[in-house]
Amino acid sequence: MAVIGIVFAPAITAFVAQGFDGPRRELTTVLVRILFPMTGLMVVSAWCLGILNTHRRFFLPYAAPALWNVAGIAAMVGAAAWLKGGDLYGFSLALAWGTVAGSVLQIAIQLPTCWRLLQGIPLRVSLAPEGVRQVITAWLPLLVGAGVAQLSGLVDTFLGSFTGEGGLASLGYAQLVQVLPISLFGVAVTAVALPDLARDAIGEGANEQLRARIAVGFRRIAFFVIPAAFAFVALGPQIIGALFQTGRFDADDTVLVGGVLAAYGIGLLGQSTVKLFASGFYAMRDTRTPVRIAITSLVISALLSWFFMRRFGAAGIALGSSIGGTFNTVMHLYDLDKRIGTILQRADWRIIGLVVVASLIAAGLAVGTGYLATAWRPISRGIAVLGIFGVAYGALTLAFRHPDAIRAWQSLTGSPAN
């Protein structure tokens, strides 16, 4: 696969980024050739993740990707010291090679633990290895589903190349921020829940146990992701300004990327919880239903992104993606409800309602703070509005006696919440 990607990099780039001019297309082709070998490295890393998760070792496989980021940052710092100028071509190559090196480090830190857990990794030749047929039968729909998820990103890239100067870059910057709560809370909760969901699916009272575990996982993700979504929508420019507004990234860029981030915020809860609901199907050995739903959602997302792009530019692409992602999650929940019974009960919706109310009030206070701090520097203003938002949300959820807020307070302080 990596060799095919290297050989056909020009054709891939021409197809995916048709709106690029000559120099940008040439640079993209070079970067694709450098980065494609990373696909094989990521497969090995995913294998390590599966082994470690099966043995309930969750920290290492999700901490290891930090080395990927560290290597990229180190490469950029080294390039800045070496090039001593604004050579964007050189910086791009440095970042690409840095991420490849980071992928190697990501594997290297996980393999020793995998080796110990498996008591060695024996290599042998067999024409009929045990369990391979069952794995392939379950894997093919998952492969199609993963391909659909990747196609969604390619559709955004394809459309973004037609939004003019800065359009595609604004999507990239916004996605860097969007993926943070999804990874920290959505992916993390799902990863921890999946082994238990698989055990629940074959135990006594399987449907009841699955419903309860999925509901708890959804509430825990929502407790962190719903306020993040409100922050993205209400405070997008302040967040982007604090993170990126320096050098060539000016106030106009902050407004543009902030609008894209706000559009992504609309679908943040759906994007964060869809894997949890899909894991419910996987636990029941059903890998086809999530793929069917994902394909339908991809078509809806692509059509809406194209429609909104014509009016709102890059933010329209993000809005279409958000609506499609939310539809994807709703359909997963709908099908699961039909299969195992209603997952989210009235008490669950009440708890989620408390989160929405707390997030709304906190967002209002933060927006007011932003108006008062209009003359401040972007970093100071961002810290102020996010600080007010976080404190207000935490205090309100504690006042509402939200169970996850109480649990978080007890974990942080070691004392009961009064």
Image (cartoon, grey):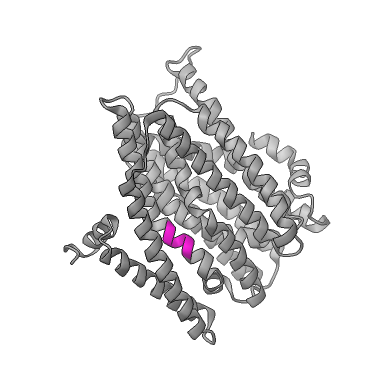
One can see residue 151 in this view:
no
* Residue 318 relative to residue 211: left or right: right
- Residue 358 lies, in percent from the top left, at 37, 65
User: Residue visible at 68% across and 73% down?
Assistant: 85
User: Residue visible at 78% across and 55% down?
Assistant: 20
Please identify the dominant SS of the magenta region: helix
User: Residue visible at 67% across and 49% down?
Assistant: 304
- Residue 379 lies, in percent from the top left, at 50, 78
State the residue in front, 223 or 57: 223
Residue farthest right in this picture: 22
* Residue 395 relative to residue 381: left or right: left
- Residue 332 lies, in percent from the top left, at 48, 37
User: Residue visible at 77% across and 56% down?
Assistant: 162
The correct choice, above or below, for 120 with respect to 222 in the image is above
State the residue in front, 138 or 316: 316
Query: For residue 228: magenta?
Result: yes
Q: Which residues are magenta?
A: 226-230
Where is the C terminus found, in terms of image quarters? Answer: bottom left
Quadrant of residue 365 within the rendered picture: bottom left
The correct choice, above or below, for 165 with respect to 41 in the image is below
One can see residue 272 in this view:
yes
State the residue in front, 333 or 280: 333
Count of numbered circles on the image:
0
Query: For residue 329: magenta?
Result: no
Quadrant of residue 175 within the rendered picture: bottom right
- Residue 201 lies, in percent from the top left, at 33, 28
Where is the N terminus found, in terms of image quarters? Answer: top right
